[in-house]
Image (cartoon, rainbow, N blue to C red):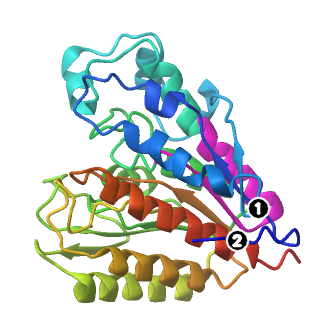
Amino acid sequence: MSYSGDSTMRPMPVWYHETYTEGISRSARFPRDRYRMLRERLNDLHGTGLICIESPEPVVRDTLLIAHEQDYVDRFLSGSLDSKEVRRIGLEPWTDAFLPRTMMIIGGAVEALAHVTRFGGIAANMAGGTHHSHRSFGSGYCVFNDLAICALLARDEHGCERIAVLDLDVHQGDGTATILEGEEGIITISVHGEKNFPFRKAKSDHDFPLPNGTGDEGYLRAVKESLSIIEDFSPDILLFQAGVDALEYDALGNLDVSQDGMRIRNGMVFSFLDRRTPCVLFMGGGYSDPIEHTVDAFQDLFVAAAESNALYDPH
């Protein structure tokens, strides 16, 4: 895909730091190189006017306490989690860079939120979507919940009265659902694999569980219904967990969505925003084998987001 570099376009800020990759051990059972590979894919767009790469600052402790219990936060920061808690999070063995990686990822999400609440448009974090983290424990590769933190910050510090969290990762956003349950002005919507992790589901405001093998038609129908709910809610901001692990190639997905289906999904979401509703894009999951299929899908996602952002009405 080529881009002319039209100077009238507004670049989409994308937060990235090399620790997103380097903070995970090479021996961890996790495709850490997807972050680096996506960054390399997007290099040609950096500086063209379509996207700009920003480096995050680590989140501060007090921001974590918005969505998490103090005891859990402090034990993670001090390296005092027990072995069972560490195993529940995964990404073992943890390196010295794992803690700063965690803080950088949440920091990138918080900065992306601050940007769109001030300037509108779309901003993205090239990691995150840590929706399995609960108030008092981490799970499923997720230490702290960036979606829940940003939803509460949007309401309590950025003046947003209606916040929608749309989670299209194949794994239900159970931590997001439990943290945000009953929170005024916030709705959670999850489209996910019915028989996939987490095997004990939480209750989002709106859940769309899909059977194994669901392809483009069933998946896109659920996305359309989700967007209809969000349209009726009329949010001031959308937080979009945009995992691509529903892909047919994904090793952990168990669904059968094509690359074209993913592109259609992206277009549906960004068209819904209608060049007006601010949006923060969280990268979410993707575990294809080979990983290039996942990186292809993420590249399509970020380019589609940037092209949509370029059309936003700043007024």
Residue of label 2: 309
Depicted 128 relative to depicted 90: above or below: below
Closest to the observer: 49 or 230? 49
Q: Secondary structure at mark 1?
A: loop
Would residue 123 be counted in the magenta stretch?
A: yes
- Which quarter of the image is occupied by the N terminus? bottom right
Closest to the observer: 315 or 127? 127
Q: Quadrant of residue 255?
A: bottom left
Q: Which residues are magenta?
A: 107-128
Residue 157 visible to the viewer: no
On residue 173, the disc is none
Closest to the observer: 209 or 93? 93
The local crowd at label 2, few if under 14, some if 14 to 19, many if 20 or more residues have their Cα within 10 Å, is many
Residue of label 1: 11
- Which quarter of the image is occupied by the C terminus? bottom right
Q: Residue at x 62, y 80 (%)?
A: 273
Q: Is residue 133 left or right of residue 60?
A: left
Q: Earlier in the sequence, mark 2 or mark 1?
A: 1
Q: Is residue 309 left or right of residue 91?
A: right
Q: What amino acid type is highlighted by mark number 1?
A: Pro
Q: What amino acid type is highlighted by mark number 2?
A: Asn
